[in-house]
C-alpha cells in the first residue's frame, strides 16, 4: 500500500510515523522545504508514552507529486483545507482514497466536491500531541487512536488494507462501519471541550474548581449530545458518561483551540463551534451556550485580525 501523508506535524508526523514503524506500507511525507531539510537531516522523531521512534523517512515537496498513491492521509487544520486540497491534487487520481482527520464535519463535502464522493473516506484521530521547535513530535498522553471507514458504511478492501498496514505499530488504528457516527461522537466531546475551555479560558480542572463549573461543563456536554441526536447521530449513553467522567479524571485537559488562542494563533471557530451552533438552530435546540462560545471565539478572531492581542502591534499576516 502506497500512502502519502500531507504534513509531518503533530498528527501527520505521529500517525504517518507509526505507519513507517509498522513497515507494511510505502510511506512518504509531503512537506515544506524547511521541514524536508529537518527530516532529511534528523529523521522523523516521536517521543511518546507508547514508545519512542526515530527513523529516516521519504519526503516530498510541491512539484514532486505524481499520481499512483493508494491513500492520502490529510491532517491539515480545517481552516487550511482549501490549500490542502490544492497541495494533494497532483497525487490524487480515481484510484486514490483521501482520508481526512480534520476536526468537524464540513470538510467532507468540500473534499467530495474536489475529488468525487468515491474518493473520500471518513476519519478521526484522538490524540494529544504537539510539534516541538526542534521538529520532534511529542505525544502528550497515552491515548492514540485513528479510526476510519467508508462513508456508506461498507467495510471495503481499502479500509481493511489500511488497518492491516498499521499492524505491529504501537498505536491503535481501526476500520469502523459507522464512521459518520464516530465522527459525530468525537464532535460532541471536542465541541463541548472547546466551548468550555475557550469560553472560560481554563482547563477542565480549573473550570471544575469554580463554583458550579463542573455542572456547567456537564450541561454543555448534554446540550451538544442533544444536537448530535437531533441530527440523526445519537451518542451511546455509556460514551456520554465517559465524556462526563473525563473532566474528573483529566483535570489538566483543554482543547487545542485554547492552546492556539492563548498563543495568538488561528482557531477553528467556524468549523467546530459555528457548525454546532447552526446544527442546534436547525434542530430547534436551545443554543444559548453554543452561541455564547461561538461569539466569544469570533470576537477573538476579530481582535487578532486587528492586531490587538497582547504583544501584537499590527495585524498578523494572512
Image (cartoon, helix red, strand yellow):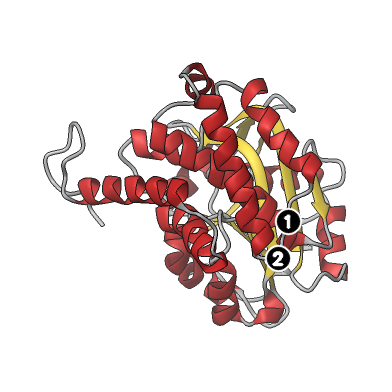
Residue 3: percent from left, percent from top: 70, 61
Near-viewer residue (214 or 92): 214
Residue name at image x 32 percent, y 51 percent: 298
Q: Quadrant of residue 156?
A: bottom right
Count of marks placed on residues: 2
Residue name at image x 82 percent, y 51 percent: 174
Residue holding disc 1? 234
Q: Is residue 114 left or right of residue 69?
A: left
Residue 236: percent from left, percent from top: 79, 48
Residue 124: percent from left, percent from top: 67, 53
Residue name at image x 70 percent, y 65 percent: 232
Q: Quadrant of the N terminus?
A: bottom right
Q: Is residue 34 left or right of residue 51?
A: left
Residue holding disc 2? 232
Disc 1 to disc 2, C-alpha distance: 6 Å
Near-viewer residue (191 or 50): 191
Q: Is residue 11 visible?
A: no
In this view, which residue lies farthest toward the left?
Answer: 313
Q: Is residue 294 visible?
A: yes
Q: Secondary structure at mark 2?
A: loop
Q: Quadrant of residue 55?
A: top right
Residue name at image x 44 percent, y 69 percent: 82
The reply to whether callout 1 and callout 2 are in contact (CB within 8 Å) is yes
Near-viewer residue (172 or 183): 183
Q: Is residue 103 left or right of residue 303?
A: right
Amino acid at each position: 500500500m502506497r500512502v502519502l501523508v500531507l504534513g509531518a506535524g503533530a498528527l501527520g508526523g505521529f500517525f504517518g510515523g507509526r505507519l513507517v514503524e509498522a513497515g507494511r506500507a510505502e510511506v512518504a511525507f509531503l512537506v515544506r522545504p524547511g521541514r524536508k531539510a529537518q527530516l532529511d537531516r534528523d529523521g522523523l522523531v516521536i517521543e511518546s508514552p507508547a514508545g519512542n521512534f526515530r527513523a529516516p523517512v521519504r519526503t516530498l515537496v510541491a512539484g514532486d507529486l505524481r499520481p499512483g498513491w493508494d491513500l492520502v492521509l490529510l491532517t491539515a487544520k480545517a481552516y487550511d483545507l482549501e490549500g490542502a486540497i490544492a497541495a494533494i491534487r497532483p497525487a490524487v487520481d480515481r484510484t486514490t482514497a483521501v482520508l481526512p482527520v480534520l476536526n468537524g464535519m464540513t470538510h467532507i463535502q468540500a473534499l467530495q466536491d474536489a475529488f468525487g464522493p468515491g474518493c473520500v473516506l471518513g476519519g478521526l484521530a484522538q490524540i494529544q500531541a504537539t510539534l516541538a521547535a526542534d521538529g520532534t513530535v511529542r505525544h502528550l498522553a497515552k491515548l492514540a487512536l485513528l479510526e476510519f471507514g467508508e462513508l456508506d458504511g461498507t467495510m471495503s478492501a481499502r479500509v481493511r488494507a489500511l488497518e492491516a498496514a498499521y499492524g505491529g505499530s504501537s498505536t491503535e488504528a481501526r476500520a469502523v462501519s459507522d464512521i459518520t457516527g464516530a465522527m459525530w461522537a468525537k464532535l460532541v466531546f471536542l465541541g463541548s471541550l472547546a466551548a468550555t475551555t475557550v469560553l472560560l479560558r481554563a482547563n477542565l480542572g480549573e473550570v471544575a474548581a469554580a463554583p458550579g463549573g463542573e455542572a456547567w461543563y456537564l450541561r454543555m456536554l448534554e446540550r451538544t449530545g442533544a444536537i448530535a441526536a437531533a441530527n440523526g447521530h445519537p451518542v451511546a449513553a455509556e460514551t456520554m458518561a465517559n465524556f462526563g467522567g473525563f473532566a474528573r479524571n483529566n483535570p489538566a485537559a483543554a482543547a487545542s483551540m485554547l492552546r492556539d488562542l492563548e498563543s495568538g494563533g488561528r482557531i477553528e471557530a467556524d468549523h467546530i463551534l459555528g457548525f454546532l451552533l447552526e446544527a442546534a438552530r436547525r434542530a430547534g435546540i436551545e443554543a444559548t451556550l453554543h452561541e455564547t462560545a461561538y461569539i466569544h471565539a469570533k470576537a477573538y478572531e476579530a481582535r487578532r485580525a486587528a492586531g490587538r492581542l497582547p504583544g501584537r502591534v499590527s495585524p498578523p499576516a494572512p
